[in-house]
Amino acid sequence: GDSVTQMEGPVTLSEEAFLTINCTYTATGYPSLFWYVQYPGEGLQLLLKATKADDKGSNKGFEATYRKETTSFHLEKGSVQVSDSAVYFCALENAGNNRKLIWGLGTSLAVNP
Amino acid sequence: EAQVTQNPRYLITVTGKKLTVTCSQNMNHEYMSWYRQDPGLGLRQIYYSMNVEVTDKGDVPEGYKVSRKEKRNFPLILESPSPNQTSLYFCASSPRGSRRPSTDTQYFGPGTRLTVL
């Protein structure tokens, strides 16, 4: 079945450092790919998405490119801020799954001033 | 403000005492679903609903019931809670309920942290 694997955390960075969180997936066909973020004490918010190969999703300085050849959707940000401290989830939605999202286990990010 | 709301946000209860976690959305969305989040297991779907009066089981439906009598509400019912249902629960909604691929965003509620003693 479909699955998502993302790098384990926690990831600790200093402010203004470059961030990469790796995400790879296994799925048939052409799933839609998502990054969700969970800030402390809050729910899940969509950060960005890409719905077809080579699409780049972007939001709040974060970017991720849908790479079908490597089945990856890595999250990047050029300069992180303390306010980016959160848990980041990679997820996919595929045809035939009744709109169910398949999730990675999440990567915790802590940004120090 | 467009949102998904859940109540209660936190609940501590005892084994066997029936409870309901409410979920409501004000966006006229067709699709709604419930997930539970557990350490090491991630988020798993419990039930989903494509539209009013249409519900179906997700991956971990045992011990749960749902209903969808109105478009905006999708309550999660635990008839006889057990300690293994201690978890963080999320409700989600999305504009369209379709079995075909969708690019719609799924919007999540703030979560309900349930502890069953």
Image (cartoon, coloured by chain):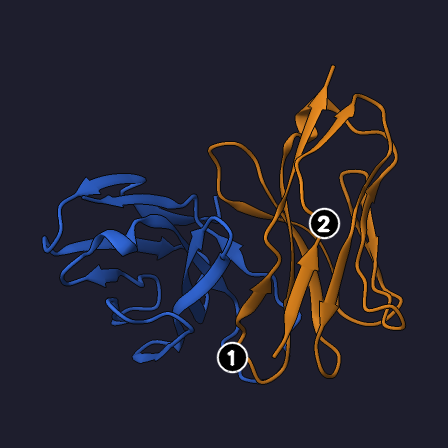
Mark 1 and mark 2: Cα distance apart in space: 27 Å
Give the mark nearest the N terminus, 1 or 2: 2
Chain B palette colour: blue
Which residue lies at the image location 49% right of the left edge and 76% below the top edge?
Answer: B97
Judging depth in this view, the residue of B100 and A22 nearest the camera is A22
Q: Which mark is residue A7?
A: 2
Q: Which residue is mark 1?
A: A98
Which residue lies at the image location 53% right of the left edge and 81% below the top edge?
Answer: B98
Labels 1 and 2 touching (C-beta < 8 A): no
Residue B15 versus residue A42 in the image, above or below: below
Which chain is drawn using orange?
A
Which residue lies at the image location 79% right of the left edge and 59% below the top edge?
Answer: A73
Tell me residue B16's x, y (percent). 10, 56
Tell me residue B69's x, y (percent). 25, 72
Tell me residue A14's x, y (percent). 79, 21
Judging depth in this view, the residue of B47 and A45 nearest the camera is B47
* Chain assignment, label 1: A
Q: Furthest residue to the left?
A: B17
Q: Quadrant of the C terminus of chain B?
A: top left
The answer as to whether the residues below labels 1 and 2 share one chain is: yes
